[in-house]
């Protein structure tokens, strides 16, 4: 899908991009191809796309995947997506992904192996965390994000950007920046560069989605110690947290941003075991 095709579709259906939804439609065939190359879809693959928009990725992805489901918040796109997705065997759910329940899907047992999305900055973190909570068996995520948002994903301990997203994605698997995308590859053109990232599940790890809520609680009060922040959730006593930290060789005055992702995971395992 190129810019002229995007303009033609917008004109045909009377669409306009909504700033409130962060809509910038991808219109670069080379970028679309590169994203699909990363996805490596075939007829054995189950795929979920969040926010297909005009279907720039969808119209090709649906032909490659074995099972294809898209979730779209904007019902205006239904005539277009009915044609390019449902007309080729895929399914579309019109709902805000952040409000999506398993029962909303065509098959509540649907478990995508690959997830694709062009993520607006304002919902990037909650969507990425929800995906890892909803679909623990997912093997690969390919996301388009604003390049400046990469700091929140790739951040290291003891930095300002280090938080739940950087910790949880690190624990989920291997993550890498694949390439940048200039603003001219979208219509309307955003004011920032974008980047495509890939997160691949670590097959050797046992993924427990419970680590997500735990990590968010641990970072809830960033200016406080980890003990105070985590105990504020009401799930763990201060004594239990101090004891678990001691088992890790950490002082009770430690702050969450000082811990490695693996140390946060180990803390979660100790406290979950004691609580159980």
Image (cartoon, rainbow, N blue to C red):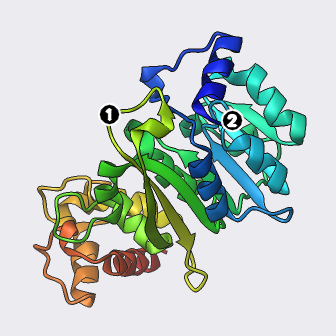
Q: Residue at x 28, y 81 (%)?
A: 244
Q: Residue at x 81, y 39 (%)?
A: 91
| Of 140 and 273, the residue lying toward us | 140
Q: How many marks?
A: 2
Give above or below for 186 relative to 208.
Answer: above
Residue 208 seen = no
> On the image, which quarter does residue 123 sit in?
top left
Q: Residue at x 65, y 12 (%)?
A: 11
| Of 246 and 57, the residue lying toward us | 57
| Of 218 and 239, the residue lying toward us | 218
Tell whether 123 sits left or right of 160.
right
Decide which of tag 1 and tag 2 comes sooner along the chain: 2
Say which quadrant the N terminus sits in. Answer: top right
Would you call the spot at circle 2 few (<14 residues within 10 Å), some (14-19), or many (20 or more)?
Answer: many
Give above or below for 199 relative to 180.
Answer: below
From the top left corner, tell me how far across and down residue 121 is, in percent: 38, 40
Which residue is tagged 2?
55
From the top left corner, tell me how far across and down residue 94 is, in percent: 69, 29
From the top left corner, tell me how far across and down residue 29 is, in percent: 62, 45
> On the image, which quarter does residue 251 sit in?
bottom left
Which residue is tagged 1?
191
Q: CA distance from mark 1 to mark 2?
A: 22 Å
């Amino acid at each position: 899908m190129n810019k002229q095709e995007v303009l033609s579709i917008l004109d045909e259906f009377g669409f306009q991009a909504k700033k409130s939804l962060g809509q910038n439609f991808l219109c670069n065939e080379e970028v679309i191809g590169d994203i699909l190359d990363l996805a490596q879809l075939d007829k054995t693959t189950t795929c979920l796309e969040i926010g297909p928009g005009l279907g720039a990725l969808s119209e090709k992805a649906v032909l490659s995947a074995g099972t294809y489901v898209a979730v779209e918040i904007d019902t205006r796109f239904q005539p277009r997506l009915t044609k390019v997705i449902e007309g080729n065997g895929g399914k579309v759910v019109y709902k805000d992904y952040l409000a999506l329940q398993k029962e909303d899907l065509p098959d509540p047992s649907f478990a995508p192996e690959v997830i694709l999305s062009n993520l607006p900055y304002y919902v990037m973190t909650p969507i990425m965390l929800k995906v890892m909570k909803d679909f623990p068996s997912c093997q690969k995520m390919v996301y388009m994000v604003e390049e400046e948002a990469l700091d929140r994903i790739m951040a290291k301990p003891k930095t300002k950007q280090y938080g739940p997203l950087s910790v949880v994605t690190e624990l989920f698997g291997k993550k890498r920046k694949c390439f940048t995308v200039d603003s001219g590859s979208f219509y309307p053109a955003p004011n920032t560069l974008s980047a495509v990232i890939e997160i691949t599940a670590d097959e050797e790890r046992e993924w427990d989605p419970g680590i997500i809520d735990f990590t968010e609680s641990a970072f809830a009060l960033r200016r406080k110690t980890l003990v105070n922040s985590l105990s504020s959730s009401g799930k763990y006593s201060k004594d239990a947290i101090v004891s678990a930290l001691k088992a890790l060789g950490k002082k009770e005055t430690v702050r969450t941003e000082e811990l490695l992702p693996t140390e946060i995971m180990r803390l979660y395992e100790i406290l979950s075991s004691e609580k159980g």
